Image (spheres, grey):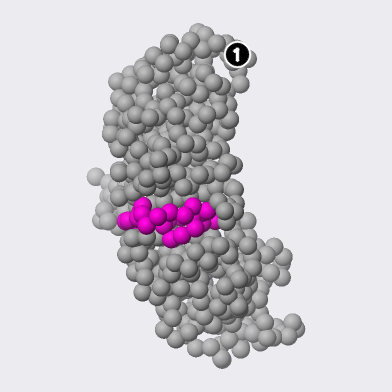
Amino acid sequence: MPTPSPIQLLPLHVIKLIVSHVVGSSRMKFDDVWTDSQEYKELLKPLLWVSHNLRAIALPLYCNYFKIHIPILPQGANCVYDLLPRRPGDDRVSYKYLGHKTHHLAKELKVELDERAIYSGRALEVLSCVPYDGCAFPLVRKFALTLVTEELDDVDKSADIDLPRAQANIKAFVERADQLVPIVREIRVQLEDFYLTDSTDRLVGYLASLLFQLADRVNYDYKVGTATPVWQHLDTICNLTHITYTSLSSDESFLQSVRRNASTLQALDIDSEDEYVDIGGLIRNTDGSYVTYPCLLKLFLCWREDYDDDDRVVSSDVVPFPILQRLMILTEYPFGDDVVFRGNASTLECLNLKLTNSVVSVLCGFNVFTPLSHPKLQYVNIEDCEGDIPDLFATPIDYTQFVLGIGSRAHMRRIDIASIGRSIIPALSLPGAHTCIQVLKLPSLKFNLWDVFTLVKSLPLLADLHTRAPAIDNFPNTISKDELLAHVISNYAPMGERLRFWYVMCPGSYEAYTRAALCVLLLALKCPNFTHTATFRCQREPLMKAMEEIIASDSFQPYVPRLQRLLFKGWDGKQY
């Protein structure tokens, strides 16, 4: 009997760690992704042939996502398709390579088709033929239906639609979808390259209303078209827990749907591309009474129109979001008071805000953030809309102290406010201040190398740093890297015991890459556990090359063993 491979004898928990390392499973805490990317699949594919144990762990991840494409079929065309894992850029992964059917492992299913294939009954034909007949995806919790417009010469786009027949075919299609995904929790309806006419608008609304009754989490992505949004057809939908809505507009019918589900909603995402969002309609009924969302944990608001001071919503003493945990407002805060923050100081964990003069006035006027408020706030992302220091503050230092006071005990902070400049360095360096910070992202601030050293020394728990490539100030331009190395070695003690990762955003010149590489290497010499760096994907190769050239120089030879431990980390978890 042949001797089994050593990897075959590894404990199962070790194999799981190997797979997690390969696919880079340590995603951001607040990310929620559909695992359909080509890169994700390519990382997993080689593991399927290493050993039986690795295959057992990697195969469910590889087959996590299925895609079925149903085109408009000319009359007489064959409508039988293989049921196979689908990937962008590689339509088929044959069973003969995987060894057995794998649809029962899928947890996400996407069906892509022209909506006319549903109205004509062709979509139902496909799902009723071999191999789909009697087939189900028993583990699928996420189901996405993407409607596209296909340009085919032999399909008459101007032909009138038989509405009764189309509605009957829609109902039959949804019944078949219910059989395909019997335990589905989340349904996404997405319109791509699509234009709704008056008749198809009603049909899409009918289709969405039937599909959304199968789940308690709905996602409607409507970035194209000009017809009335689908929500006017969904007046029977109740008890939803998640609503995600992306559209050119959000009219009263949509707001009515949100308010109707206020008692059960746990997450609400609104992304309006163009039109003004009547955000007051979320918390106020048409009769003037106010609405409460007792279960809402996540609120995401994004729109493209700016608010004038006269447009801001001012509420009564209502507490609409009493247990809110995640608040993300990607444009200007639309309220004239603290209504969003009422009652949830003890529950808020994640905050994303854009600051302007008026927003700062509201936050300060209502004393929203104090040193002892929001004890659970862990992630804070603060950005600036206007580029100038608000009128309430005389100096950048005053403004910096206000910004840092928003979630003063947060472990993860992202501050994208260019106007505060380097005043953040002394503010973060105050004794005992902000020592709980573990992740710090400062994408718009310009530093020098000595500022970075000061940050690392002042924040004892700092493990993850994101900045622009620092300058090297206070030295003549003619100083050599050998002299700079000698200065750092002799004048700086070891620091940043927790620091492990530095993301460096580099300008595009050769000198900039050389300077950034030198700063990364010098910091690595003083931070014993600093092992990973990263930059934009297009900048990785030149930055790596610059680092290799510096390490190869004579003055850095004594430190080669330490610097060779420094690795580049890609967005997908791969190391270079």
Secondary structure type for disc 1: loop
| Magenta stretch in the rendered image | 312-339
* Prevailing secondary structure class for the magenta stretch in the rendered image: loop
Where, quadrant-wise, is the N terminus in this rendering? Answer: top left
In this view of the protein, which residue sits in the foreground, 96 or 429?
429
Q: Residue at x 36, y 25 (%)?
A: 210
Q: Residue at x 48, y 10 (%)?
A: 162
Whether residue 517 is situated above or below residue 290 in the rendered picture: below
Q: Residue 148: which quarter of the image?
A: top right
Q: On the image, numbered disc 1 is attached to which residue?
A: 158
Q: Residue at x 41, y 37 (%)?
A: 256
Answer left or right for 140 relative to 33. Answer: left
Q: Residues within 10 Å of mark 1 (few under 14, many from 20)?
A: few
In this view of the protein, which residue sits in the foreground, 79 or 164?
164
Q: Residue at x 42, y 78 (%)?
A: 435
Whether residue 187 is situated above or below residue 458 in the rendered picture: above
Whether residue 372 is situated above or below residue 308 in the rendered picture: below
Answer left or right for 321 relative to 550. Answer: left
In this view of the protein, which residue sits in the foreground, 444 or 244?
244
- Residue 167 percent across, percent down from the top left: 41, 16
- Residue 61 percent across, percent down from the top left: 37, 44
Membership of 28 in magenta stretch:
no
The three-letter code of the residue at mark 1 reads Ser
